[in-house]
Image: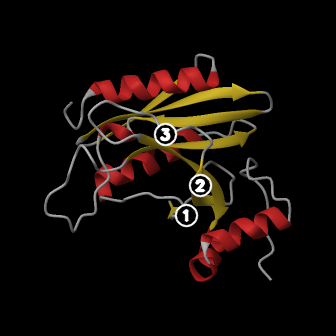
């Protein structure tokens, strides 16, 4: 299978439908020199799960590597769970999903990623920490499994604190203070 085969996207989309058991609402963002990234929204009671579709077309590779093993290099998509249907969240998620292809970013559990602007209008969250999503890795023939990372939204001050103390320490603070990470309009956690 070619590195950018549409079969990867079909496989991921089928896995989403099986996991969420319903048809999603869709939005698409185009980037110069890159195939569009779609964001699918799956309603779930008071919450919505937003997942990217298109990031996994290309393997994530360290820019210092001379040769990239397209079949063995990791591939991924992103998921964020939010309440209140925040405006333009899908656009920010698509931008973060394009970063591996545009900026040669390699995402992994525990990474901190930051747009340096609100994830949606009125939000203090500008990025987040990548975590396990609860979705099983998606097998795709001929290439590495596609991982789905959950983006745990964080404010700029939280991300700056986590650069010093670590992503896991920030997750512990969120848990200790019962932070509602689905609320993109929440106050930052106390960092003292």
Q: How many other residues sit within 10 Å of disc 1, few (<14), some (14-19) or many (≥20)?
A: some
Secondary structure of residue under mark 1: loop
User: Seen from this angle, which residue lies furthest right?
Assistant: 177
Write down the residue under mark 1: 110
- Name the image quarter holding the N terminus: top left
Write down the residue under mark 2: 131
Q: Give the quarter of the image for residue 29.
A: top left
| Structural distance between the alpha carbons of marks 2 and 1 | 6 Å
Write down the residue under mark 3: 137
Residue 5 visible: yes
Q: Earlier in the sequence, mark 2 or mark 1?
A: 1
Query: Residue 156 location, x and y as percent?
Result: 62, 69
| Structural distance between the alpha carbons of marks 2 and 3 | 13 Å
| Structural distance between the alpha carbons of marks 1 and 3 | 17 Å
Which circle marks residue 63 in the picture?
A: none
Query: Residue 71 location, x and y as percent?
Result: 24, 43
* Residue lying at 41% horizontally and 33% vertically, measured from the top left: 139
Q: Taking 188 as reference, is 56 above or below it? A: above
- Name the image quarter holding the C terminus: bottom right
Query: Of 74 and 87, which appears nearest the observer?
Result: 74
Query: Residue 72 location, x and y as percent?
Result: 27, 48
Secondary structure of residue under mark 2: strand
Q: Taking 73 as reference, is 170 above or below it? A: below
* Residue lying at 60% horizontally and 26% vertically, measured from the top left: 19
């Amino acid at each position: 299978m070619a590195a950018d085969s549409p079969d990867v996207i079909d496989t991921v989309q089928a896995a989403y439908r099986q996991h969420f058991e319903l048809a999603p609402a869709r939005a698409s963002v185009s980037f110069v020199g890159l195939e569009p990234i779609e964001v699918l929204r799956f309603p779930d009671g008071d919450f919505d799960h937003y997942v990217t579709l298109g990031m996994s077309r290309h393997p994530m590779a360290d820019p210092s590597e001379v040769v990239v093993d397209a079949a063995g290099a990791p591939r991924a998509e992103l998921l964020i769970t939010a309440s209140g249907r925040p405006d333009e969240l899908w656009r920010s998620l698509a931008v973060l999903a394009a970063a591996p292809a545009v900026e040669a970013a390699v995402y992994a559990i525990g990474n901190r990623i930051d747009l340096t602007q609100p994830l949606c209008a009125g939000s203090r969250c500008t990025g987040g920490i990548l975590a396990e999503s609860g979705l099983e890795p998606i097998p795709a023939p001929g290439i590495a499994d596609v991982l789905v990372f959950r983006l745990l939204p964080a404010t700029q001050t939280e991300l700056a604190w986590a650069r010093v103390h670590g992503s896991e320490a920030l997750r512990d603070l969120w848990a200790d203070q019962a932070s509602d990470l689905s609320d993109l309009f929440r106050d930052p956690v106390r960092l003292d």
